[in-house]
Image (cartoon, helix red, strand yellow):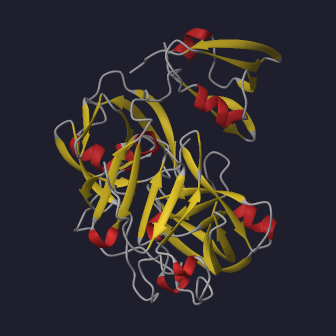
Amino acid sequence: MSFQGALMGLSRRDLLVAGALLAPGTALAAQDGVTYPFGVTRNAAWAAVNLDGKDPPLRFLIDTGSSGFGVLDSKARELGLSRYGKSSGQAAVGRIRVEVYGASVLLGGAVREPWLPLSGLPYLPQSMQGLIPLARFRVMGMDFDTRQVLIASRLPKDLDGYEPLDLDAKRPVSGSVDRMGSYTNDDNNQLRMDHRPVIEAELDGERVLLGVDTGSDYGLFLFPDFVKRKGLWDRFPNPQAGSTRTLAMSINSRTVRAERLKIGKLVFARPIVTLGDPAHADKDGSRREVGLIGMEFLRRLNFISDPQRRRLWIKPNAAIGDGYRYDRAGTEVGFVEGVARVTELSPGSPADRAGLKLGDQVTGWRGADGLDGLSWALKGAPGSTVEIQVARDGVRQMVAVVLAEVI
């Protein structure tokens, strides 16, 4: 149940817009940069966005893996946003055709655009209502210690403690950048560019190119074509079966432990890796990158991206020593025809041993935030207990699942 990257870019005609970001003489126009606050909810980074001046502000997912703003179709209809047309784009796995809406945007209470196109989206994780494409900005950074997003026209002078990484210099020119004032890569609003950061890393001794994707709640997701090409699907012991939700479809996946992930000078021992089912190879449109590095790793790093200089600066933050989160119950819960049910159950897993059955209706759990909160709790520390209420044959009962290391 994860969002794995957003649209790789709509058509140029659909994304080119006119108009200035800010009136001359305003405070933001006179600055080299601006910051605004963000929150993190269960590996989803988000900021407040107002559309067409309407309150309350919406929670928009901050997504370095997207090149265009997006909004849930249901929310766009609820707000009565104007329809601009239709277009198609490439999601992490598969293509998707979307409605395009138009609205004024106030981002984080700090950055305003009189009118922008927003791609209509059928699904977003963690009850998010839209997307903020950080990759469109000339310089952008996220500081997880202070929970501040930076967008700027040039790199900050103080980079003490940050390590520079080269971005993929051979990345094809594609995607889209529309106007967002002096902080964007394309002030003249004429070029088509792809400034989503892609870094080189080392996974179990092999060089890999990874998209830096705050829109993904996983640690490391490897695309199906790479999994197939390298024969990874059956290589790791004790794989945990599951599914991965993308904009285009839901695909089978496996969660495994690799030996070592190296990013610059940082080394992550025994990292959690999600493998896309090779049956979906040749559908991901991944170009040169072979996977995505998501929030389970990125939330441990403060980073600043300067795509014009082809550099990403990283610095470990206070979360660098946190344990990895992944499904330690061996089960997944999802909606089936509007009813929450146990949709995945690994034989011999903690959930199986506790007495959960495939197809059980989940009527509640001893915790908050509904299904999202339950899914997060099932990724908790080994030895912790998650109590789930299920209905089976008309009888309700509590099932206590004791989490364990299963891979």
The image quadrant of residue 22 is bottom right
Q: Give x and y (percent) for residue 163.
A: 27, 51
Q: Residue at x 28, y 62 (%)?
A: 311
Q: Give x and y (percent) for residue 230.
A: 22, 43
In the displayed structure, would residue 158 be above or below residue 20? above
**Residue 190 appears in the rendering:** yes
Q: Give x and y (percent) for residue 300.
A: 42, 40
The image quadrant of residue 374 is top right
Left or right of 329: which side holds 153?
Answer: left
Left or right of 339: which side holds 151?
Answer: left
Q: Quadrant of the N terminus?
A: top right
Left or right of 394: which side holds 110?
Answer: left
| Residue furthest left as drawn | 205
Left or right of 170: which side holds 99?
Answer: right
In the displayed structure, would residue 38 be above or below residue 132? above
| Residue furthest right as drawn | 394
Q: Quadrant of the C terminus?
A: top left
Q: Residue at x 48, y 67 (%)?
A: 151
Foreground residue among 75 and 157? 157
**Tag count:** 0
Q: Residue at x 40, y 34 (%)?
A: 254
Q: Give x and y (percent) for residue 55.
A: 80, 64
Foreground residue among 301 and 272? 301
In the displayed structure, would residue 11 be above or below residue 45? below
**Residue 276 appears in the rendering:** no
Q: Residue at x 55, y 49 (%)?
A: 45
